[in-house]
Amino acid sequence: MHIMEGFLPPLHAAAWTAVSLPFVVTGARRVVRIVKQHPHAKLLLAACGAFTFVLSALKLPSVTGSCSHPTGAGLGAILFGPSVMAVLGCIVLLFQALLLAHGGITTLGANVFSMAIVGPWVAYGVFKLLRSVGGALTVAVFFAATLGDLATYLVTAVQLALAFPDPISGFAGAVVKFAGVFALTQIPLAISEGLLTVIVINLLTQYSRDELDELAFTAEVAG
């Protein structure tokens, strides 16, 4: 999710930026509507951004010599919808690039697409699907956050494979190679993120019911 500064070819970096921009603009409009319609949700919105910032800032060494990160994007996608996370994730990744040297400015579009667009949409889709078939809230939250995390890294592997196909096996071989670099550490990290997101949701349903009621979240999950 944090492709470093200057790592992608310029055309690839520009293309991912162009693809991500409409999602970020739509997310910004969605955030403005939420703030206007649900002013008491501001703190919860900020908490989702902070959750994403803290988790995705953790840089954990991989046994393969690379690094893996949680994403934290599933929480906001579950509570506010995936479009909101496009703008929150963009802000998070921009600050991390400027302040922590995680990612970069030229690769911001690619990182936003994997972590702040695809990851949240997968998390949201999994959550809605499991709830629609009668899945328990904790089960739906766990799989949503876990699979959203893994989807982020799969997309990152695809992005890297497109930029650097394997000389012998081409794009497909490069996807397997890049995905394999992260898999050993990212799978347990994704499971841990899923469990942590369940804990946070349970705490919010206990101690922030007013804000969740305003968003109609508690009514939805009780249905």
Image: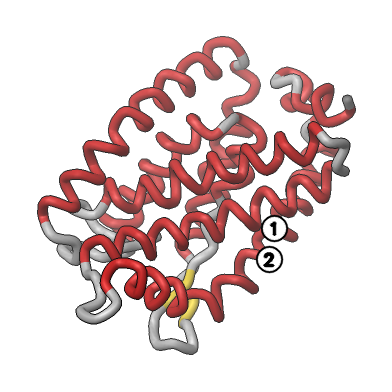
Of residues 21 and 135, which is closer to you in this image? 135
Q: Position of residue 30 (x, y in %)?
A: 47, 20
* Residue found at x 74% / y 47%: 141
The residue carrying pointer 1 sits among few (fewer than 14), some (14 to 19) or many (20 or more) residues within 10 Å by Cα, namely many
Vertical side of 135 occupied by 97: above or below: below
- Disc 2 on helix, strand or loop? helix
Vertical side of 90 occupied by 26: above or below: above
Q: Is residue 205 left or right of residue 92?
A: right
Vertical side of 116 occupied by 209: above or below: above
- Disc 1 on helix, strand or loop? helix
The residue carrying pointer 2 sits among few (fewer than 14), some (14 to 19) or many (20 or more) residues within 10 Å by Cα, namely some
Circles 1 and 2: CB atoms closer than 8 Å: yes
Q: Position of residue 45 (x, y in %)?
A: 57, 33
Q: For residue 133, which quarter of the picture?
A: top right
* Residue found at x 42% / y 74%: 176
Identify the residue position indicated by label 1 in the image.
194
Quadrant position of the C terminus in the picture: top right
Identify the residue position indicated by label 2 in the image.
191
